[in-house]
Image (spheres, helix red, strand yellow):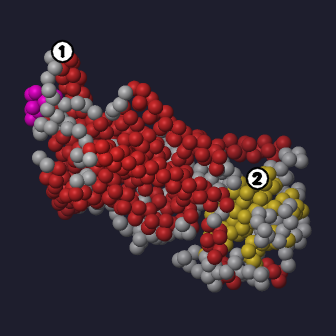
Amino acid sequence: MAITIAVSSRGKQWDLPAYMPVIAGQENIGADESTFVCTAIKDGLKRSGLVFDLSVFIPRDQNDYLVFDTSPNGNALSVQVNEQRQFVLYFGSTDFGTEITMPSPEFVSALNQQILNVGSNPVFDKLRTTVFLTRNNTSTETVSIEAFTSSPFLSSVVGVIPVSSIVNVACSEMRALGIGITGSKVEIDIGLTGRTSKASSLHPVFFKRGVASLLTLVWLMCLWLTREEKNSKSSNKAENVHT
Amino acid sequence: MNGTAKLYQFLIAVLVLSTMFLIAQTAMSSYFDSSSSTYPYLIAEGSNGPDDIGPLECKTRILGGHYFGDFQSEYCRMRQVTPYPIDRPSSYWPGFYVISGLLVLFPSSVSAFRVVMLLAFVFGTYVMRSHFVRKDLAKLAPLLIFTFFPFWFAIDRGNYGWIFGSLLVSLATTKSARSQRYWIIAVAISLKFPLAVFGLLFFADGSWKARFKELSKFFGIFVFLNFLFPVLQWSGAQYWPKTVLRVQGLMPGESSIGVTSGDFDLYTRSDIHALLTSFQRFSFIGEFKLIAFKAILLGIIALVIFLSIRKLSEHENRNWGLVELSIVSGCLSVLLSPFSFSYGLMALLVPLVLLLSPQGDAVRFRNTYLMLLAVSSVPNAIPLRSMSELLFHPIEGSMKADFPDLGNFLIPVSLITMLLLVAYSAVLSYLSTKETQHNPVVANVDQPQ
């Protein structure tokens, strides 16, 4: 059974079209682009992030509860619910472990229902997905991979993998980081080494929340300072009356 | 007694009490071979870091080998698409993330933690100086917060909700913040919901019309921070009410940190629960001895109340107001809060400061309150397990792993005593008010105890 994945770009630096349907069964990206480990990860890239909107139309297998998969041929990112009803993140053939505890029965039941009712509607429609690859401080030979989505059911999937196993991450001459997906690759401009960490931390969602929080605090601070002005004004008035 | 002498006396009392508990702890360790510590461990956790922090990326050792779990956990939670992921239930109201969401603008948890802790010290100093405006007191006042053990415990955990929440409530009790306390308390409760009981402070003064107006403004800000704002800003915010219901202690069974407990455990429940559980843990000593033990505790409460009442001047006529309400709120917050770790005692900072500062009115039993607050807030978690084993020779396996320490008894007993004294004081005020209505007398509010 085929999966249809829609990847839409966010931001002008992306070379992808705004809406790029990818049909399962196509070949992976070429070896020259994908089979070497990104030197940036080895040589100082602290953190790289990939943000995309993912729409899954038909799950591959109703029995193994595949949630989404960037390629059916391996060497790609996939998230599955296993027999123990745990979310598992796979990259290629590497199992990143079962860091996520059991999803709620309501979710599993809703997922089953969605699978049954899927028709032409997507199981997940424009699921904002962020994948972070972070070089570990303690060991330069391993990186953490985390996948966050806008669904609270599919967040903070964490795993640790050896650098050598990331064969599908590529750095282009244009300083772009790519993670291979079927038929093409998704790119994000990482800029100079060290800037990516900041860039990825300024993820639009929590960056907006941060700015909103800052504005709220500024407003509260204004309330406080205005109070002091009022007090000092009234005390000045009182002093003037006395004099 | 002037303010400086009162403050000095309290600080010395804290120093003496802390030393006494430390000596007792050392003696217990030596004689009973107890390995537990009264003071928090400032050591690194396992190689993978503490379990409560979350994603691997968040497990950075911030100071030496130490993790500041509550801070790192929330910092990372805020950097996700939603701070309410299903796999790690949050115990905070959305307002917490609205207020402190700006922390995600810092590139790492290390830099964010440093800034927050610096702010905690600066804001703590500011609040203390707001209470003690006189020059000689203002210099001494910051020592009150810097010798307050729960403040350091909260820093050790990185629990800035308790630090800033309690300091904000304390700031709201100053006369200069009177007109602004509706939003200050709304922000404080958003940061730590066990502080909600401090909403009683709105009833400390003013007419009913003024109170209604102030409460309306308070609810406006509270609803904006916790309901309206998150829905406008966050994807997935609609899931929060369900998550809040999972808050530890409010629902039986599974706690928010994923520990399933069929029994009441000592350290994740309210202090009043912890006291009852502590009695259960001592059930191996036999029914008669346990009743005798409870009788001794009741006797201590009765003795403290008796001595306090005996000292009370016969014709003393004092109003019952802000200070008493802050004592009730502080005690209830600690006794009923589902999180009973030592940082929860931060709530006691509010009555403590009011009792010592010139901002608080004259109250009955001031010295008793101060003594009980000092006893409750110094590091008093002296383990009793080894001593109990030696004294009572329990059957093997009859003592549970989470055996109570001295603090599990001392804190609730002290706070219950305070509540009883406040209640007695309320009765006296009511009677004297009635008496004054029939036969007016001039009240001497400055009369020292």
The chain carrying label 1 is B
Q: Quadrant of residue B125?
A: bottom left
Is circle 2 on the same chain as circle 1? no
Q: Is B104 displayed left or right of B411 in the figure?
A: right
Q: Are marks 2 and 1 in contact (CB under 8 Å)?
A: no
Magenta stretch, main secondary structure, is loop
Q: Is residue B398 visible?
A: no
Q: Residue at x 62, y 60 (%)?
A: A207
Q: Position of residue B28 (x, y in %)?
A: 20, 58
Mark 2 or 1, which is nearer the eye? 1
Q: Is A26 displayed left or right of B444 in the figure?
A: right
Pointer 2 local density, CA inside 10 Å: few below 14, some 14–19, many at least 20: many
Q: Which span is picked out in magenta?
A: B309-317
Q: Nearer the viewer, residue B187 or A230?
A: A230
Q: Which residue is mark 1?
A: B438
Q: Position of residue B292 (x, y in %)?
A: 18, 35
Under circle 1, the secondary element is: helix
Question: With respect to residue B374, does A203 lie above or below?
Answer: below
Q: Residue at x 86, y 58 (%)?
A: A4
Mark identifier at residue A177: none
The chain carrying label 2 is A
Q: Which residue is mark 2?
A: A65
Q: Is residue B223 visible?
A: yes
